[in-house]
Image (cartoon, rainbow, N blue to C red):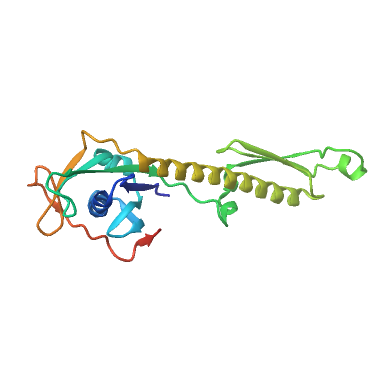
Amino acid sequence: MSRRSWVQITAGRGPLEVRRFVALLAGRMEALCEERGLAVVDVTVHGDEGAPASVEILVEGDARRCLGGEVGTHALVERSPERGRAARKRWFAAVAVHPAEAGAGAGAGAGVDPRELEISACRAGGPGGQHVNKTMSAVRIHHRPSGITVRVADERSQRANVRRGVERIAERLAERAARRLAEGEAARWSEHDRIVRGEPVRTYRVGRKGELEVAPWRLPKYRTTLSPGRRTSAR
């Protein structure tokens, strides 16, 4: 299965001018993803589409390798029409890449591959009962990739205990995935406040037609319009 990543473009706590830059930069990043062989799955816009606080592009492929030179601070050299001529004219946004963890929703248990399980029978423990002491109905199941091991003796038949054990492993895997997902979300959102000004990886200006031009300006231009139909607004 192809690896998935989030390409995050964020304004941090920047003003309206920075959020407008984020919208333009997201268009450039989506174009770069497709140019460099990454499959764009969808685009999530946090806020107004013309001036979002951040944009997240979900891609399939090796995003860190393909976009390694784009991760970091990006600068736009542009005067704001809402401010005087003496006001600042350099605006900063950030690009980061984060792994996209699979969700832990319904169907997580279906992901347990029987070939990754080691199942062995064992004598059921616990007090009393001739049937409990004389049968090998309990099972021990070890999931090699995760290192999770469960021992199940709830049911009277070995087959039922195997089924119950696989379900429990699936539950533990889902819990781990949910924790990783929450940690990943926290890491992504922490990037909103981590824009380092100075030494940007790319510097731009806005061309006559409203497109970003990469310094030294003679390089190819990137249209700013995100493809329709693959965007989810998250306000």
Q: In front: 184, or 37?
A: 184
Q: Can residue 83 be seen from the camera position used here?
A: yes
Residue 161, placed above or below residue 228: above
Q: Residue drawn at (33%, 42%), measured in percent from left and top?
A: 96
Q: Can residue 43 be seen from the camera position used here?
A: no
Residue 224, placed above or below residue 18: below
Quarter that holds the C terminus: bottom left
Q: Residue drawn at (26%, 39%), measured in percent from left and top?
A: 73
Q: Residue drawn at (85%, 38%), measured in percent from left and top?
A: 126
Q: Residue drawn at (74%, 48%), measured in percent from left and top?
A: 161
Query: Picture quarter containing residue 75?
Result: top left
Q: Left of 118 or right of it: where is 98?
A: left
Q: In front: 204, or 42?
A: 204
Q: Position of residue 22 (x, y in %)?
A: 27, 51
Q: Position of residue 42 (x, y in %)?
A: 36, 58
Q: Left of 147 or right of it: where is 229?
A: left
Q: In front: 105, or 152?
A: 105
Q: Left of 171 or right of it: where is 218?
A: left
Looking at the image, the residue that sits furthest to the bottom is 229
